[in-house]
Amino acid sequence: MSTCDNLPPVKTSLTGIKPTHLPHLGNYLGAIRPALSLVEHYRTLYFIADYHALTSVRDPEALRGYIRDVAATWLACGLDPERTLLYRQSDVPQVFELTWVLSCLLAKGQLERGHAYKDAVARGDSPNAGLFNYPVLMAADILLYDTDVVPVGKDQKQHLELTRDVAMRLNHLYGEGTLVVPEALISEAPLVPGTDGEKMSKSRGNGIPLFAPPKRLRKVIMSIKTTSEALEDSKVAEGTTVYELYCLVAPERAPEMKKKLEAGGYGWGHAKQDLYEAIEEELGPKREAYLEIRADEPGLDALLHEGADKARAIANRTMSRVRGAVGIA
């Protein structure tokens, strides 16, 4: 029996991870590291949202790879399966049963106001029905596990509001307490700049690969755009990509870098080298762990299946309540 089975009755937190690309440094600093810290205060569940990925990923082999990449990344970064649950969304089919029940309680207009759907329409795209119904599946992901809190950024709060609305509507119609109404745990995740100074993202191509080999990592770091002051000149540290990244990776040493930049005689090449060394210090051991975990695909799949077995047990209890409440059972 794992430690997870003996956790005290604390609040449950749930985090979804969409497997659509190889993780980069921004994912680690802005999402992975903050999310993993929740294990100290909550009963934590982490799921790989592979069905959500189908709205954009069309290559089945790539998707299978991304799923394992994500699982191996989070495990290498410190996720302990003895203290939490890690599972694939697709291994818990009850989520689609709950999605249908929730769909019957939501108005078309509520889904039309979803950020992803609205943004696609505004760009002139022709969004698929999966993108339109995305918020319903997201709500089911959350409500299926009696989730108390969901860590979200300020820009993601709308999706949780829809989840709360539909949960309260179902409870009002069919009986209070049928579903747990979750609260937002607003994440103060940092804005991580990419190599061009803009927010690090896959779409911009400005990411710093999370587990790149040392030579490639250094090459990427050295490509970061900087100003062109002379070596002896004083330099402004605040607001620069190199310094802001250093603050996130090595906050205790950041004041020293700032002092050296402002004093002169310390160039951006020196600062980039220090940044590279700080990232390598932080991620080097994790890279080795990732490569070992990722190479053992049978072991990785077995771990995900074990997590799914426990997740389905929770899902079955929730769906038993829901079926009874709505008159299906």
Image: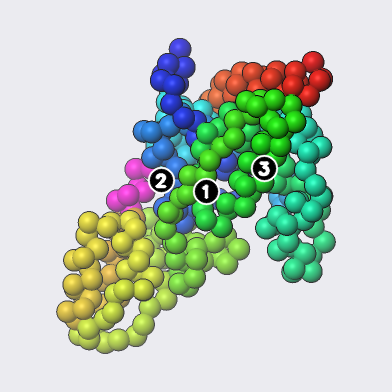
Quadrant assignment, res 258: bottom left
Say above or below: 197 vs 302: below
Image coordinates for residue 87, horizontal then vertical, percent: 58, 30
- For marks 1 and 3, the one nearer the N-term is 1
Q: Is residue 295 visible?
A: no
* 314 inside magenta stretch: no
- Do the CB atoms of the residues marked 1 and 3 lie less than 8 Å apart? no
Q: Which residue is mark 2?
A: 33
Q: Secondary structure at mark 2?
A: helix
Report crowding for label 3: few under 14, some 14 to 19, many 20 or more residues within 10 A (C-alpha): some
Quadrant assignment, res 245: bottom left
Instruction: Give left or right: position of 150 versus 239.
Output: right
- For marks 1 and 2, the one nearer the N-term is 2
* 284 inside magenta stretch: yes
Report the front residue among 163 and 240.
Answer: 163
Instruction: Give left or right: position of 214 versus 154.
Output: left
Query: Mark 1 and mark 3: span between their CA atoms?
Result: 17 Å
Q: Secondary structure at mark 1?
A: strand
User: The C terminus appears in which quarter of the rendering?
Assistant: top right
- For marks 2 and 3, the one nearer the N-term is 2
Q: Residue at x 18, y 72 (%)?
A: 259
Q: Which residue is mark 1?
A: 152
Numbered label tally: 3
Report crowding for label 1: few under 14, some 14 to 19, many 20 or more residues within 10 A (C-alpha): many
Image coordinates for residue 28, horizontal then vertical, percent: 44, 50
Q: Secondary structure at mark 3?
A: helix
Q: Amino acid at mark 3?
A: Asp
Q: Which of label 2 and label 3 is nearer to you?
A: 3
Query: Mark 1 and mark 2: span between their CA atoms?
Result: 14 Å
Q: Which residue is mark 3?
A: 165
User: The N terminus appears in which quarter of the rendering?
Assistant: top left
